[in-house]
Image: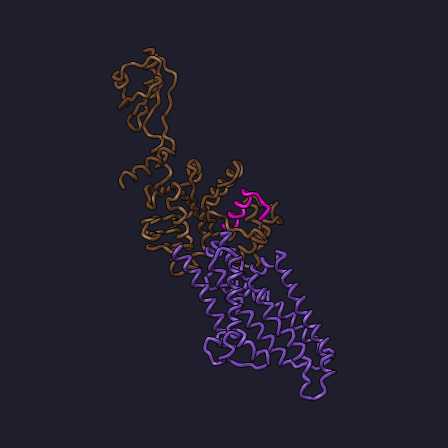
Chain colours: A purple, B brown
Amino acid sequence: MIVNIARKELKGLFSSPMGWVILALLQFVFATFFLMGVDQYFLTMSGSIRPDQRIGVTEFVGGSVFGIAPFIMLFAVPLLSMRLISEERRQQTLPFLFSAPLSLTEIVLGKFLGLLVFLGVSVLLIGVMVFSLNLWADIDFGYALSNLLGLFLLLASYCALGTYVSSTTQQPVVAAIITFVALLALQLIEYFLAGDPSNTVATLSLMRHFEPLSRGLLDTRDIAYFLLFIITFLTLTIRRLDADRLRG
Amino acid sequence: MTTITVEASELTRKYGGRAAVNDVSFTLNKGEVLGFLGPNGAGKSTTMKMLTGNLAPSNGSVKICGIDMMERPKDAKALIGYLPEQPPLYRELTVDEFLTIAARLHRVSRQHIKKAVDVAKQRCGLTEMGKRLIENLSKGYQQRVGIAQAIIHNPMVVILDEPTVGLDPIQIRDIRALIKELGGEHSVILSTHILPEVEMVCDRVQIIHKGSLVFNGGIDVLKQQRHGNRLLLGLRQPPAHDALLSIPGVESVEALGDNLLRIHHTPGATPSEALVQAAVSQNWGLFQINPDQTSLEEVFVQLTFQEAVAA
C-alpha cells in the first residue's frame, strides 16, 4: 500500500512539467560542476608536484559535485515537497486517502517515499556520472559510495522536514518558504557557532553530520542522527494528520 | 435475510462546546437506500464524515458490517465507498489514471483493476472520457468521476454526499437510476436537500436538524404524512358547512377563500364520490376536486419547525 501511494505521488510529479524541469535543471547543474571538476583536475594537478599536494580524481571531482549538491538541493526539495500534503488539503482530496483502507502511517510513508524515489533518480544520475570516471581512471568507490549515501540521507532529511511543513498549511508556497528557511537555518547553525565547535546546538546542524560522510567516513552517530531526524518529522506529520481527524 | 451493513450508535460530534451532531443512532440494512435530509448546516456532512472515518466522533461508535470503525479502521474502510461534498479528484490526471489509482488504493487485485475501471466508467457514463484530463471535464462529469471512484471496488456501503449537485437534468436522471441500481446490491446513504429526489430513490428517510434526528422512517410513512386525509374542493355556490358535514366521512370543513374548501375526512373513507353526487344534485357548481397533498417541503418544514418549537 505504501508503494501504491508512492506511485501515485510519482505519477503526480511526472504528469506535470514541474517534475521534469526540476530533474533536468538539477542534472544540468551537477553535470556542469562535474565537468568543471574534471577540467580543473588536470590544471591543478599539473601544478602540484609534491606528493602530499596530489589528491585522487574521485576526491577532487567528487568533492566538487558533492560539495555543491546539499546547497542546490536546499532550493529543489522545498519546491518538490511543498505540494505533498498542502495541495491535497487545498484541493480537498485528503478524504480520498482518508476513506481508503490505509493507515495514516502508510499515507505519510508513501508520500515521503514517492518524493525520495524522485530525488533518488537525481542521486543515481550523480552516481553514474562519478562512476563514469572509472572508464579512464581507477576511482575510489568507497569514497564515492559514502558520499552518495550521505547525500541520500541528507535529502531524506530535507524531505521529511518538507513533508511535515507541508502538512501544516494549505498554501504550497507558504510550505516552500518555511521549509527553505528551516533547512537554511539548519545549515547555517554551524557557521553561527563556528567559534564554539563543542556547542550542543551546533550538533543539530545537518551539514555537520554530512561532512564526515563526504570525507568518506562512515560514522553510526551521523547515520543515527539522520534516521532520527527523518523519523521525528514523519511522526510529527502523522500526528498532524491525525489531529485533522480528531479535531476536524 | 436482511443483514445490517451500517450501524451508528449515539454518534456525537462537538466543535468547541457546540454539538454539530448530537446523539444520532440508526441502522441500515443491505440493499436499502437511505436518504439523509436536512437544511444547510444541520450536520449531514459531519455525520457522513464520521461514518467514513474521516472524522473521529466525540462519542458513540460506527460499525460497518459489524466491523468497528474505531478499532479496525482499515477493514471497515475497505467496505465503504465515499463521495465527499467536494469530489476529491486529482485534476492533473486523466480519468483512467485516477480510477486506476482509486482501484489500487481500495485493494482491488491487480488482475481485476482494468475491468473494475471499465465497469465503473460504464456505470457512470464515462466510457468516452477515459483519456481526458479531469481538469478539463465539466462539473457534471467531474461529479461522475467522483461517483465512479466511490463504487470502483464494489463496496458494501456507498456513501454519497450531495451527489446530484451541479448536474444537468438528464445527468441527474442517470445518476438517480444509478443510485437505485446500486441500492439493489449495496447499501446506499445519500444526503441531499432536493426533496423529490429522496422520494424517487430512497427506501428510507432520515431528517436531521440542528444535529439531531427528527425523523427516521420508511419513505411510505413520509408519503402518508404527505397525502394526508384531505380533499380540496372548489364550489361556485358553496352551501353551508353543515350540509357538507352531513356527508358521511367528512370530519371538518375549512374555507380557504376563492370558493375553495379543504375537507378533512376520516382515514380510509374517501368521500369524494358522495361529494360529487351531492354537488351535482344540489347544484353547488363544482369546478375542482382533488386530494390535497402537502408538498414534501411542507412536511419537511413541519418536522424541522416542530423541533425548533420543542427546543
In the rendered image, residue A193, in percent from the top left (x then y), is placed at 50, 76
- The foreground one among B269 and B282 is B282
Does residue B256 sit above or below B133 in this rendering?
above
Does residue A138 sit above or below B39 in this rendering?
below
Figure quadrant of residue B33: top left
Farthest residue to the bottom: give it. A51
Residue at image coords 54%, 47%:
B145
- The foreground one among B148 and A104 is A104
Q: Which residues are magenta?
A: B134-150
Residue B237 can be seen, yes or no: yes
Q: Is residue A87 toward the left or the right of residue B42 in the image?
A: right
Q: Is residue B144 magenta?
A: yes
- The foreground one among B167 and B202 is B167
Residue B108 can be seen, yes or no: no
Residue at image coords 55%, 52%:
B90
Figure quadrant of residue A27: bottom right
Majority secondary structure of magenta residues:
helix
Q: Is residue B87 magenta?
A: no
Quadrant, the C terminus of chain B: top left
Does residue A96 sit above or below A117 in this rendering?
above
In the rendered image, residue B202, in percent from the top left (x then y), is placed at 42, 40
In the rendered image, residue B150, in percent from the top left (x then y), is placed at 49, 50
Q: How many marks?
A: 0
In the rendered image, residue B252, in percent from the top left (x then y), is placed at 27, 23
Farthest residue to the front: give it. A195
